[in-house]
Every structure is written in C-alpha cells, then in structure tokens.
Amino acid sequence: MAVETLERPPAETTEAPVYEDDARIVRYKIRTGMFAWMAHRLSGIAIVIYLILHVWGLKALTDRDAFNALIAGYHAPIFKIGEFLLLAAVAYHAFNGLRIVLIDFLGWSPKQKRLFWTLAAVTAAIIVIGGYPSIYAVVTYFTGG
Amino acid sequence: MKLNVKVRRYDPESGKPPYWATYEVPAEPMDSALSLLLHIKWHLDGTLTFRKSCAHGICGSDAMQINGENKLACSVLVQDLVKGDGDTISFAPLPGSPVIKDLVIDQTRFFEKYRAVMPWLINDTPPPERERLQSPEEHAIIEDATKCIMCGACTHSCPSTWADPDYLGPAAMLKAYRYTFDSRDAGSAQRLPIVDSKDGLWKCYTIFNCVQACPKEIDITRWLSALKRKAVTAQY
Ligand code: HEM
Ligand code: SF4
Ligand code: FES
C-alpha cells in the first residue's frame, strides 16, 4: 500500500492554461530574502559575463602593441564605470555568498535578516572605499581636471 | 470602515482569462481577511469560490495570496493589512498551481509531493507494549516542524516551485525533516535519497519566501538546511 503512493506523475497531468499577467515574480512582494537572492543571481551572471570578456581580452597578450592599445583603451570613462560596477557585483556576491554559507552550514537561518543588513553595510563600505578611485577618475574626466 | 476588496476571479467555463473584480466591503480592524471574502459571498456575489473550513488556522484550507504575499486568510487581521478607510486588499489564488476556479487551486501536485517523502513513521522493530517513547529533548528537535498544517502557503511562495513544478518544495521537505529527525524513525536510508535528488534540497536557494509566508511561523529554511547537512554527511 505504502509503495504505490510514491508514484509521482510528472507535472503536466493537471496543467491549466497560463495567462500572461501571471508573472509572479512581478506580483509577489519582495522581502529581504528574495531581494538578496535576485541580486545574488544577477551579480553571479554579471561576473560570469565579465570573466568571458576578460579572458577574451587576454588574447591580445600574444602581441605587445595590441596589448598596450587594449590597456590604454581601458582608461576610458566607460571602463571606469564598468570597473566600479564589477567591484560592486563582486563585493555583493562574495558577502551574500558568505551569508548563504552561514545559513546553510551553521544554521544561521533565524538571523538571516540581521545578517543581510550587517553584510550589506560592510559591502557598501567596501564599494565606497574601493570604488573611490574609479569614480574619482570618471569625475575628473568629465570636469576636465 | 469601508474597504476595496480586489479579488482575482476565474471561471474555467467562461473560457475567459482571469480578471480582477473589486467589491466594497464594510470591515472592522479586528476582522479576519477571511471574513471579507465571506461578506462578498454571502451579501454581494454568491458565485465567489474559495476554500475554508475551520476559520481558526487549524485545517490549512484557506491559504491564498493576500496583498501580494501568501497568507492564511483566517489568521490575518484587517488591521495588519490596511491603514484605514478606503484602502485596498487584494486576494489571488496561491501562485504556482493550476487554478480550478477563483481562489481555488488544484492541490493534486502539492499532495503528490507530500506523499513522495513518505510522511509517516518508518520503524520495523516490534512496537513496545505501549507507545514508542520520546524524551522532551528529542521532541524539541522536531517540535517547530510538527506545527505544519499543510496549507501550502510556503511551497507556493517559492520561486523554485514556480520555475520547476516538480520541485518537492518546502512543505514536503519540511515533512521529510520532521520524520528523519524523529528519534523513533529509522527510515532515513529510504527518505534521504528522495530529498537528496534533482527535484529536492539543492533547489533551495535560501530565498526565505517560505518562512515569510508560513502562518505557523516555522523556520522552514533552518530545518531544510539541517536536512541538507544530513544528506551530505550521510554519504561520507
Ligand atoms: C568570494 C567568492 C564567491 C563566493 C563566496 C560565492 C558564493 C556563492 C554561493 C554561496 C552561491 C550559491 C547561491 C545559492 O545557493 O543561492 C553562488 C552562486 C553563484 N555564483 Fe558565486 N561566489 C563567489 C564567486 C563567484 C564568481 C567569481 C562567479 C563568476 C565567475 C560566481 C558566479 C556565480 C553564479 C553564476 C551563481 C549562480 C547563482 C544562482 O544560482 O542564483 N560566483 N555563489
Ligand atoms: S510549513 Fe507553514 S506554510 Fe508550509 S504548509 Fe506547513 S503551515 Fe503551511
Ligand atoms: S479556514 Fe482552516 S486554516 Fe483557515
């Protein structure tokens, strides 16, 4: 008797039509945990994209002049902004990753909200201090300094 | 006070997509959200369809999405949902399962997942003359998890469930925790492989929507994390 209840048919058996404005992620209230997860996934994907571009750029290492030109190009303000965003993504991803590790390995689930805000403060400090040179470079570029 | 109550309505026989209907409902701050739906059904539109039974947070039949979050309609008060006169409260079916009518979802899949984790005591040793005893300390480990009333608010709040209808989800895996960590149970060899699978524990990204939604304030993520550690350590 017990065994037959274990049969679990695949999901499509009772599927009703899905309507366009059923986009739940838009409709469901976003609290600390869901925000932390969405930002974690976005930052993770952003870092992967960066990594691909970065390794692709390293192709130029085979040629001295091409490499120097590439590095010179990286001083453009758009890359300074990119540098800042990269720091923000990595800092957030690393500290929220630490939060997830503490929750899963040490059972810190009851403290997850406090943990989020504490680590968010640390992350913000790192972004401000570490990102200062990039922002400074962008500002001086546009103010003609 | 008077409230605008928005209800997500759907009639499968009409062939039309779901739509929002708005009703003006008189309410007191201490009324439950469920009483607003009952007022509509009794006085404004008898065709409104929703599940309820006990009206006291016991049966678990009236979990739904209220103001964008899954809650138990009978266990949440109007004063905790609105500030005052003329405010709006919205009711929608639990997201992530097929809707049968209005606020009623098809729970078939939810209970299939529940049965899949073998939510019963597994112990082949001959039963003692009276009951199998458990100390208060041993019970404390599972006490939080035993409070679950299978309302489904958690499983239907989980983005992993929305994305993958076969994901076991928090309610079923909380049951797996409740039995696996029961001092009288000897079934972890059978139960762990079910949750330690591609439809199981590893799709929990610690999003905490389930904990936020649970009307019994169970720290589901905490117990699923314990189950994750058990699933990993059991292999080595
Ligand atoms: C300090 C270094 C890092 C830490 C502590 C860290 C931590 C984590 C953790 C704990 C997860 C699992 C998230 C979950 O279960 O919800 C994760 C996911 C992920 N990480 Fe990292 N990570 C780090 C660096 C990186 C780097 C360098 C990349 C990209 C090259 C990256 C890309 C990703 C991606 C794409 C995911 C999947 C996101 C998801 O499933 O939502 N991570 N990371
Ligand atoms: S864990 Fe909480 S939200 Fe989930 S089914 Fe049980 S009572 Fe409902
Ligand atoms: S009607 Fe029974 S739990 Fe709400």
Image: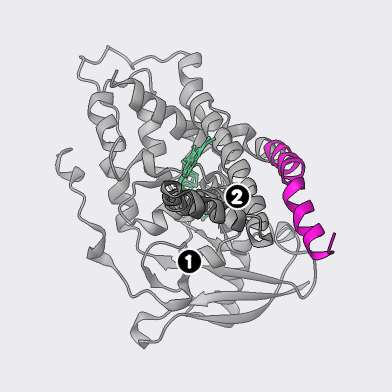
Residue B36 location, x and y as percent?
63, 69
Determine the residue positioned at 49% across, 65% down. A24
Q: Is residue B39 left or right of residue B123?
A: right
Residue A41 location, x and y as percent?
50, 51
Q: Secondary structure at mark 2?
A: helix
Determine the residue positioned at 80% across, 68% down. B84
Q: Please state which amino acid type lies under the numbered disc 1.
A: Pro
Query: Ligand 3 closer than 8 Å to the CB at disc 1?
Result: no
Image quarter for residue B174? top left
**Other-residue count near label 1 (Cα within 10 Å), few / some / many at <14 / 14–19 / ≥20:** many
Residue B110 location, x and y as percent?
34, 53
Residue named by callout 2: A86
Look at the image and give the residue range highlighted in magenta.
Answer: A118-145
Determine the residue positioned at 64% across, 33% down. A111
The disc placed on residue B93 is 1
Q: Is residue B132 left or right of residue B151?
A: left
Q: Please state which amino acid type lies under the numbered disc 2.
A: Leu
Residue A131, above or below B70: above
Q: Nearer the viewer, mark 1 or mark 2?
A: 2
Residue B121 location, x and y as percent?
29, 27
Image quarter for residue A142? bottom right
Q: Secondary structure at mark 1?
A: loop
- Asked if residue B55 shows in the view, the reply is no
The disc placed on residue B191 is none
Task: Give the CA distance from mark 1 to mark 2.
Answer: 40 Å
Residues B207 and B50: in front is B207
**Other-residue count near label 2 (Cα within 10 Å), few / some / many at <14 / 14–19 / ≥20:** some
Q: Is residue B191 left or right of residue A99?
A: left
